[in-house]
Amino acid sequence: MAGRPALFLDRDGNLIRDHHHTCLVEQIEVIPGVRPALTAALDAGYELFILTNQSGIGRGIFTWDQYHACHARMLELLDLPAPGFRAVMAAPERPDQPSAYRKPSPRFILEMGAAHGLDLSRSWMVGDRRTDWEAGLNAGVRSCAVRSGKEFGPEDEAFARGAGVAIHDDFPSFVRNELGLRTLG
Ligand SMILES: [Mg+2]
């Protein structure tokens, strides 16, 4: 029997505003419409995962404690119904450091797929950067690019279109248009 589908979600610039190395609790601002969109996905049977590159930790810009405080604040603001996010992976390495999980690595997606018996053929990776889309493509799941108020550079735009990455204004738009769900609120 096929398992449940999943959404693998970038954090900054997808669920919350991207302040470039977002590390202060006061900076945590959920993008409008994300909470009802996540709730609609949960109601429709999607498992939710977060996969976030946090090189600010490896660069010494902020600490794990700050990261965890920001994560707690985001969960508080989202106030999702159970089970909320099934698992969260934050990769702390700098881009020049070896990393098992830093995007575009597909490893987290593949491991979660096996651990939770997910149906990866109906699963998505959603984010605002090319490394997000590449992680999804590398794992064999569909990828979605979300602008979240910014424009992609021409090279990223061309990559997304050439690779068959879906492009939407934001995460709620993805949920409505690709998953076909209503997002109230
Ligand atoms: Mg991002």
Image (cartoon, rainbow, N blue to C red):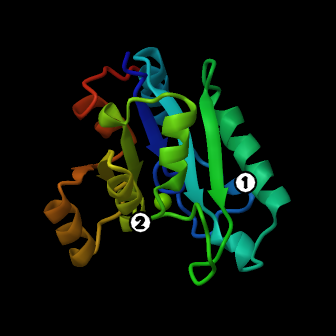
Expressed as whole percent of the image width and height from the top left, the position of residue 147 reads 33, 56
Residue annotated with mark 1: 26
Q: Residue at x 23, y 51 (%)?
A: 167
Quadrant in which the N terminus appears: top left
Say what secondary structure mark 1 lies in: helix
Expressed as whole percent of the image width and height from the top left, the position of residue 74 reads 66, 42
Q: How many marks?
A: 2
Query: Which residue ends up furthest to the right in the rendered image?
Result: 65
The answer to whether residue 182 is above or below residue 91 is above
Quadrant in which the C terminus appears: top left
Q: Position of 66 compared to 36: left or right?
A: right
Kind of residue indicated by mark 1: Glu
Expressed as whole percent of the image width and height from the top left, the position of residue 46 reads 44, 25
Residue 153 found in image quarter: bottom left
Query: Which residue ends up furthest to the bottom in the rendered image?
Result: 96
Q: Residue at x 36, y 58 (%)?
A: 138
Q: Residue at x 77, y 78 (%)?
A: 60
* Ligand 1 within 8 Å, label 2 CB: no
Say what secondary structure mark 2 lies in: helix
Identify the mark at residue 131; answer none if there is no mark: 2
Which of the two labelled residues, at mark 1 and mark 2, occupies the earlier sequence position? 1
Q: Position of 135 compared to 168: left or right?
A: right
Kind of residue indicated by mark 2: Thr
